[in-house]
């Protein structure tokens, strides 16, 4: 029979192997397998880097940054752990608000919205599941793996955009959560204090992969239970009116515009994907891992999106709920359904839990910030992951406060626009993998340390510019509507961005390979 002491010892050994804890860290060539952290920065036993790493390890924090995870240090014991992780990350308030847009902004019915939510969410999740397979294969973070596709220097463009996205979406999620906390008990809690609570909870990411995965494994349970309560209260209110399916050119444009928001919400995790599978064993069942991630991302997004559509379908037929939406967004509708109309004090408790669920999604954003920053420059790489994580939380909090009091609408519009770059990322990486590398057999993990063995990046830069042209002519946003988008009318930004980028890359990459030989 295994004793408690034996179990604790096994956990300690696992954590030491994962880089989460160590009694006396040693720094040598194995710590710099990605080639960006310079050996001289690590070699000195009393250097800043070494001392900081020892301090972090003392408090059982993950010390590893973008360094490759050796195969004998892969600690994930189940292929289903990514499913638990992504389920918690997406079983939150944000996709509820996105699901409501089909009715509130685009004038669709509940059934139109539901079909659109299902299709575009699954379509957007497929790249996330695909990129997750590279984590076990190479033991590298997503932005470092991306060097194989964009080149050593070309990937820096995407790393910068990913940092902006991580911080921006964390800030907007924090604003939404703080607004709900502020609405409880007549605004007794200042909004800035609610943001500080969420930011403090997001500091959980300082401890790294193991603790974040443990938290996310269970964080979805209370939010899922509360969403079921919301469904029960909504059904009992008899205010839900689904409507009928619509058709026509205007409906097609609305589907495309709403679908763009849904696709962006789902595929936005693609640039984080392998960050959360690097500790999977290399011989993991790839099919099971693919569907584990696919289900873990898509199901909660579909579930919460349809719930948002249902809440909005009820709100348009209920004057006080519609007023609540116009004043406080989807949080106002939730307040009306579970507090004003039914559960009162317990309903307020439910809203507190839903607001704090934002910590789960912020943890995913903040954890990946460090790896994107470290991928920008070797000077950034020598700064420990924990420092960048801490600064990421601080930046997210500072921007969220500014966004709430001064420029929330501008921030929201800006984040919607920069989301189009995800299609550029996918339109270059997918043909590079399947066409020009011929699958996994075309990779040599040692090349990741040598810029001269990676794509030069000229084709990437040209294709990126072509993708921007696709954004300009196809997007339909508050600040700009492209000429093609005006013809439909509807948002074709994602589709045209992908097509423009894909065609440009497939046309120019052979020339680049012929001239440079790589």
Image: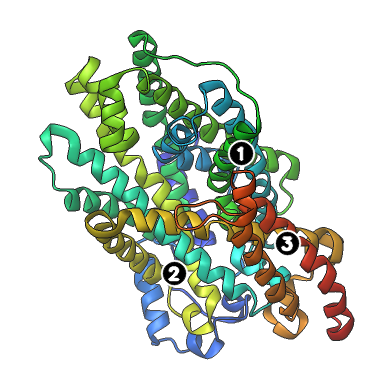
Instruction: List the residue tagged with mark 2.
Output: 385
Residue 344, percent across and down?
18, 20
Is label 2 in a helix, a strand or a loop? helix
Compared across the picture, whether 355 is left or right of 241 comes to left
Name above or below for residue 232 compared with residue 81: above
Is label 3 in a helix, a strand or a loop? helix
Front disc: 3 or 1 = 1
Q: Residue at x 55, y 86 (%)?
A: 38
Q: CA distance from mark 3 to mark 2?
A: 36 Å
Q: Residue at x 86, y 82 (%)?
A: 517
- How is this picture coloured? rainbow
Instruction: List the residue tagged with mark 1.
Output: 253
Relative to the observer, which residue lies in front, 170 or 23?
170
Q: CA distance from mark 3 to mark 1?
A: 20 Å
**Chain-order first, disc 3 or disc 2:** 2
Compared across the picture, whether 236 is left or right of 142 comes to left
Q: Residue at x 38, y 31 (%)?
A: 223
């Amino acid at each position: 029979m295994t004793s408690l002491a034996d179990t604790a010892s096994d956990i300690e050994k696992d954590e030491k192997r994962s880089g989460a804890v160590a009694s006396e860290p040693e720094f040598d060539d194995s710590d710099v397998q990605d080639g960006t952290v310079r050996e001289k920065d690590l070699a000195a036993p009393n250097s800043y880097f070494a001392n900081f790493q020892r301090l972090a390890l003392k408090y059982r924090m993950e010390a590893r940054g973008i360094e490759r995870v050796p195969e004998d240090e892969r600690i994930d014991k189940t292929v289903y752990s990514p499913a638990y992780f992504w389920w918690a990350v997406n079983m939150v308030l944000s996709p509820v608000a996105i699901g409501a847009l089909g009715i509130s902004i685009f004038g669709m019915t509940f059934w139109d919205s539901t079909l659109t939510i299902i299709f575009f969410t699954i379509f957007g999740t497929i790249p996330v599941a695909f990129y997750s397979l590279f984590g076990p294969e190479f033991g590298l973070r997503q932005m470092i793996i991306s060097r194989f596709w964009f080149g050593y220097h070309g990937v820096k463009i995407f790393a910068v955009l990913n940092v902006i996205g991580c911080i921006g979406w964390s800030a907007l999620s924090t604003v939404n959560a703080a607004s709900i906390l502020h609405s409880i008990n007549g605004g007794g809690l200042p909004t800035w204090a609610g943001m500080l609570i969420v930011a403090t909870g997001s500091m959980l990411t300082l401890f790294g992969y193991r603790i974040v995965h443990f938290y996310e494994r269970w964080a979805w349970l209370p939010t899922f239970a509360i969403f079921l309560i919301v469904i029960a209260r909504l059904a009992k209110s008899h205010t839900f009116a689904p409507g009928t399916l619509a058709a026509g050119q205007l409906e097609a444009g609305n589907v495309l515009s709403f679908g763009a928001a849904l696709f962006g919400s789902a595929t936005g995790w693609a640039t984080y994907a392998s960050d959360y599978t690097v500790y999977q064993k290399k011989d993991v069942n790839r099919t099971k891992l693919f569907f584990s991630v696919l289900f873990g991302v898509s199901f909660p997004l579909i579930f919460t999106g349809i719930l948002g559509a249902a809440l909005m379908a009820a709100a348009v037929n209920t004057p006080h709920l519609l007023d609540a939406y116009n004043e406080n967004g989807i949080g106002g509708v939730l307040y009306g359904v579970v507090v004003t109309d039914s559960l009162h004090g317990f309903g307020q408790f439910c809203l507190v839990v839903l607001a704090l669920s934002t910590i789960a999604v912020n943890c995913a954003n903040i954890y990946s910030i460090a790896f994107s920053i470290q991928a920008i420059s070797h000077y950034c790489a020598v700064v420990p992951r924990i420092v960048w994580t801490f600064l990421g939380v601080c930046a997210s909090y500072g921007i969220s406060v500014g966004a709430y009091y001064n420029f929330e609408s501008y921030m929201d519009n800006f984040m919607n626009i920069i989301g189009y770059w995800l299609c550029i990322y996918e339109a270059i990486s997918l043909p590079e993998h399947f066409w020009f590398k011929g699958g996994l057999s075309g990779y040599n993990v040692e090349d990741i340390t040598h810029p001269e063995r990676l794509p030069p990046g000229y084709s990437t830069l040209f294709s990126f510019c072509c993708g921007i042209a696709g954004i300009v002519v196809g997007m339909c946003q508050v600040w700009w509507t492209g000429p093609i988008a005006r013809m439909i009318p509807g948002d074709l930004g994602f589709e045209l961005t992908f097509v423009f980028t894909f065609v440009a890359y497939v046309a120019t990459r052979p020339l680049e390979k012929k001239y440079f030989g790589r």
